[in-house]
Image (cartoon, rainbow, N blue to C red):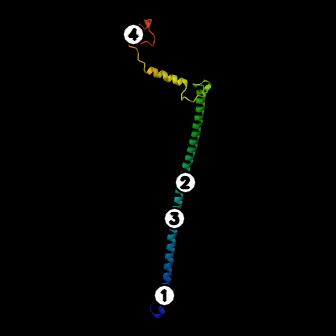
Amino acid sequence: MFGFGSSSLCYYEVAKELEGLIEWEWEEWMKWERKKQIERERRLREESICLDKKWKERQALFDILKTLWGLLDTIIELMQTVRVYITLILNTVLSGFSEFPNSMQPPCTNMPWTIWPALVELWGLCWMFYTPLSPADERQLQLSLQDAEWTPFSGSGT
């Protein structure tokens, strides 16, 4: 087998066997690569389906938010319209009430008040110091009124 003439035959057989082994490994490697490729494609399809579901969910959520935003805009516009109408109604109703005749303010600007609020304040100030008369004071008042010489500015009426 290791002789000169038989060595070429051995080499030939070894080469054939190696070639068969290489071919077998190549086929196995190709099968394995094909399985990996099929697995990769399956995972990509699953991820694509999952991403598609997530995209549809997000799109639905976006549509809901857009609808809510539109409703909020409508509510804000409605509230602004109601505010304008209430302002108009109050201006119309309250325009008839004024402390000045014909709703005209006098040109006098040297006093920070007008006559009616000043009189109301003065009236309140006067009543703040009012104390009801006691029975003794009433008798004295009656005696003073009966006295002919009594004047409002005379002391006790004597």
User: In which quarter of the view is residue 107 placed?
Assistant: top right
Q: Is 144 in front, or is 4?
A: 144
User: In which quarter of the view is residue 102 placed?
Assistant: top right
* Mark before the other along the chain sequence, 3 or 2: 3
* Spatial CA span between label 3 and label 2: 22 Å
| Callout 2: SS | helix
Q: Marks 4 and 3: in contact by CB < 8 Å?
A: no
Q: Is label 3 or label 4 in front?
A: 4
- As drawn, 105 above or below 131: below
Assign the N terminus to one quadrant of the image.
Answer: bottom left
Q: Position of residue 82 (x, y in %)?
A: 58, 34
* Residue in the image at 50% along x and 22% along y: 120
* Spatial CA span between label 4 and label 2: 100 Å
> Mark 1 belongs to which amino acid?
Tyr
| Disc assigned to residue 140 | 4
* Mark before the other along the chain sequence, 3 or 1: 1
| Callout 3: SS | helix
| Callout 1: SS | helix
* Mark before the other along the chain sequence, 1 or 4: 1
* Spatial CA span between label 3 and label 4: 119 Å
- As drawn, 111 above or below 2: above
> Mark 4 belongs to which amino acid?
Gln
Q: Is label 3 or label 2 in front?
A: 2
* Mark before the other along the chain sequence, 4 or 2: 2
Residue for badge 1? 11
| Callout 4: SS | helix
Residue for badge 2? 55
